[in-house]
Image (cartoon, rainbow, N blue to C red):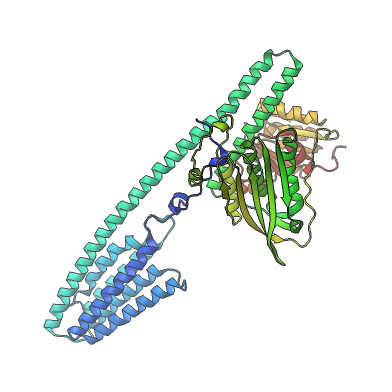
Amino acid sequence: MDKITDRYHQPVNNDRKHLDPLFDFKEVAKRTYQLGFSALSLGIFLSVYDAFIGMYVSSFLLACFCFAILMFMILKHQEAIKDLTISIFSVLCGLLICLVLLEGLQSDQYLYFFPILIAVPLVVDLKQKNSNKPAVFVGIMIFSFITCIVIGNYVKPMEQFTAQQAAKLILVNRFTALGSTIVFAALYTFFEKKYIEEILTQSERVINTKTQFLATMGHELRTPLNGIIGVVSLLKNEQSAAKQEEYIKILQSTADHMLQQVNDILDFNKIEAGKLELHPIKINLDNFLLNTSLPFKVLTANKSVEVQTEVDKQLSTTILADDMRLTQVLNNLFANALKFTTHGYVKLKATCIKKDAKTITAGFSMEDTGIGIDKADQEKIFEGFWQVYHEDTRELAGTGLGLTICNRILRLMGSKLSLESEKGKGSKFYFELTFELAATAPVYNPIMINASSDLKQLRILLVEDNKINMMVAKKVLTGFQASVDSAYDGAEALTSLAHFPHYDIVLMDLEMPVMNGYEAIFEMKEKYPLIPVIAFTASLVDQQMLSDLLASGFNDCLLKPFTPQQLLSVIKKHVGTPQRV
């Protein structure tokens, strides 16, 4: 019961704090509004009280303060001002300075600086890195407090009041300031405790998720690896050519499956790190969809499952789209549907929903006649790492990331993956995408590379410190009839180039002893600027790293593990007429 299926892994949690590492546990924005309402309520009370005891000027000033607070809150609600917190604090400090001008220090207004100081951590995230807001607030308060003391000692109060009025003011101000300080201190303790509890809960969730993820990856990677080791053992002792061919096919299939799992993990890592980016190009949508489904039609040609493609004629138009990521979404949906469908059909359907002069909205669906999903399970498939076990899927395996990656990619494209399914009657995954229309563009026609393609006229320098990787790459290249020279580090590569500076292309690993690829590329490009150099690496290459590689002089990047077709495609992309003389 330990098999994990792609179909039942689609972590879409609507609780933002479970998805967003920058989620505001302390709800600072909400606390700012609450502080504003508190200041407004207190200002109204003191304004009424001052009027009641006959201090009309102070009452009018407090009323103006209440109006200012109310206006700032309205402007913030309408997004006319950016920072409500600094506005409220500035008005509060300004009010206290004005009250000291009116009344002097004898009414103890300066005591309100204490609850204001305690309120700062409630409405300002003191734990936020690279923020100068706490310093700004403290600076405003220190300046205002010193100003109040100086004015109170050296400036005569503008409003005259009796000793009885002063006594009443002192009593109310002390009681109100002390009470506000206690309330804000209690709230600070409460919210800090809540914050710590949320952090601990988040940490436990991350640990549990990581543990579950590693357990899943360990199982799903060890399973094909065990198959590879087992088949290699059988292959060594097998004399029958037919059996050997069968074992080689099993090895190829298992290796491809393992490569797909590794690619899923790498893509998931990019998505979680926020480094997955979209790069639209011009494609013909109709041709693109037909080409995407073609490999799966070939795959199921002799099986009891039919792959169908139904594309609206209005989609025969040129659009701007990230063909690689859209292919990834459709491939995952195709593979997922075929995994759970033993008879019947799997159908990709695309319809035109809306079209205008600049954009086109298309609806995509992947429908199958497979095992379907229970209604109860449909509520759970949008939870991360949730598993459904079905006795029909015992022989099926996966990283559990396929649909997760699909949904995350669709989010980047402004869409989401939805599901309709019934147990035993199949499933339908569907989504909508809006594309920008391209005025003119070449028809999408991917390069089809076959085994007969060769590199007969090319001389290639292969720079790789791992002997097994060197042997594999060299065999692949010589199989394409290329002439290959080898070097085991950057220094050897430069020596080879010094003896023969007319290589057609250089394939160079990045992490090597003596001199790595990062160091060697600068000297290569300085001395041999016309020779294309391809980074040949197993590193996790995100968009930033790829940009850095290109900026440093590499012409392209090929990730390990690779297929012979990928290697051939990259070389042909950068080599036109051979440079050899």
User: Is residue 103 visible to the viewer in this orientation of the structure?
Assistant: no
Name the residue rendered at 20%, 77% in the picture: 105
Q: Which quarter of the image is occupied by the C terminus?
A: top right
Q: Quarter-wise, where is residue 37 in the image? A: bottom left
| Viewer-side residue, 571 vs 242 | 242
186 vs 492: above or below? below
Residue 334 visible to the viewer: yes
280 vs 439, left or right, is left
The residue positioned 32% from the left and 63% from the top of the image is 120
Looking at the image, residue 103 sits to the left or right of residue 32; the answer is: left
Task: Return the x and y of residue 18 as percentages of the image width and height.
Answer: 44, 49
Residue shown at the point (81%, 31%) measured from the top left: 480
Q: Which of the 4 image quadrants contains residue 303?
A: top right
Q: Does 79 sit above or below residue 207? A: below
Residue 511 on image: x %, y % = 62, 35
Front one among 4 and 132? 4
Q: Position of residue 421 (x, y in %)?
A: 57, 46
